[in-house]
Image (cartoon, rainbow, N blue to C red):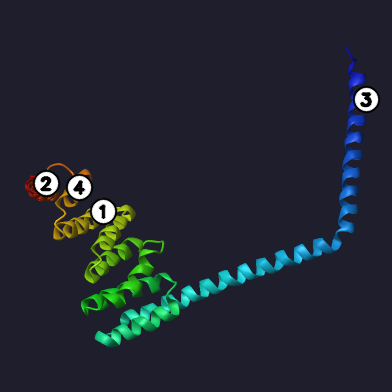
């Protein structure tokens, strides 16, 4: 077995060898850098430009969101109604359509156009919110379902309501969306489809509640309609 003194004399040698290897590697890197200095400068410059662009875009987005928030407060305080209100909302959407406030304005616009029996003008606003992310997506999908139903696109409306049910975070929201889809299925005489939706609603409804009793009653009515159709 090697004596302690022998073991101690080997450690500095290993350290020296490691230092030499590091120095050689550093020299190689330095030499490579000299040969490729132009490429390094070009890449570094490009990265710096990209970082500046990203920072500028972020600052611009924050500034735009801040302006949208202030402008929406002013818009909300307006007492305008009818066509004057829709004109205000359209102008706001044209300027701040990509912000959260812009989405809220789109939802209001879609509702106003529906009330005015102009679903074709409500459609693009409803689609925009329904296809976006964030907390307003569910409301957008519900609005889209209502708009498509008014235009006569029953299948599209049912799908929009099903999408809303999938987006919903709360059981009552899911029930609301499925209920609207079931009503459309009943209107089309598709009692099988309506019954399936009522069964889905039951899965999220507690036993012994009034809501469950109503859903069970409507399910029974739908199933009663299915039976004669099979004969």
Q: Is residue 82 left or right of residue 131?
A: left
Question: Residue sitting at 12 percent across and 43 percent down?
Answer: 208
- Distance, label 4 to label 1, CA atoms, is 14 Å
Label whose residue precedes the other's in the sequence (3 or 2): 3
In this rendering, is residue 51 above or below 177?
below
Label whose residue precedes the other's in the sequence (4 or 2): 4
In this rendering, is residue 153 above or below 25?
below
Q: Quick one: 105 or 215, which is closer to the camera?
A: 215
- Distance, label 4 to label 2, CA atoms, is 12 Å
Question: Under tag 4, what secondary structure?
Answer: helix
Q: Quadrant of the C terminus?
A: top left
Q: Residues within 10 Å of mark 1 (few under 14, many from 20)?
A: many
Question: Residue sitting at 27 percent across and 64 percent down?
Answer: 145
Residue, disc 4: 196
Residue 80 visible, this angle: no
Label whose residue precedes the other's in the sequence (4 or 1): 1
Q: In this view, does 173 lie to the left or right of 31?
A: left
Question: Residue sitting at 37 percent across and 61 percent down?
Answer: 135
Query: Contact (CB < 8 A) between labels 3 and 2?
Result: no
Residue, disc 3: 9
| Identity of the residue furthest to the bottom in this view | 84
Question: Under tag 1, what secondary structure?
Answer: helix
């Amino acid at each position: 077995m090697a004596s302690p003194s022998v073991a101690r004399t080997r450690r500095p040698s290993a350290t020296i060898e490691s230092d030499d290897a590091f120095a050689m590697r550093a020299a190689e890197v330095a030499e490579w850098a000299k040969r490729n200095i132009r490429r390094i400068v070009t890449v570094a410059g490009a990265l710096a430009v990209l970082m500046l662009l990203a920072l500028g875009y972020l600052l611009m987005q924050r500034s735009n969101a801040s302006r949208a928030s202030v402008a929406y407060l002013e818009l909300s305080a307006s007492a305008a109604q009818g066509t004057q209100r829709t004109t205000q909302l359209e102008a706001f959407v044209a300027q701040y359509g990509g912000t959260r406030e812009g989405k809220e304005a789109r939802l209001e616009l879609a509702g106003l156009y529906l009330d005015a029996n102009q679903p074709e003008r409500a459609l693009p606003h409803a689609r925009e919110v329904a296809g976006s992310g964030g907390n307003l997506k569910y409301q957008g999908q519900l609005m889209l379902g209502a708009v498509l139903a008014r235009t006569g696109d029953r299948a599209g409306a049912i799908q929009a309501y099903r999408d809303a049910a999938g987006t919903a975070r709360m059981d009552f929201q899911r029930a609301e969306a499925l209920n609207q889809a079931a009503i459309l299925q009943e209107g089309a005489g598709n009692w099988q489809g309506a019954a399936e939706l009522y069964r889905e609603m039951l899965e999220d409804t507690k036993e012994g509640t009034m809501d469950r009793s109503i859903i069970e009653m409507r399910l029974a009515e739908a199933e009663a309609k299915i039976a004669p159709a099979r004969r």
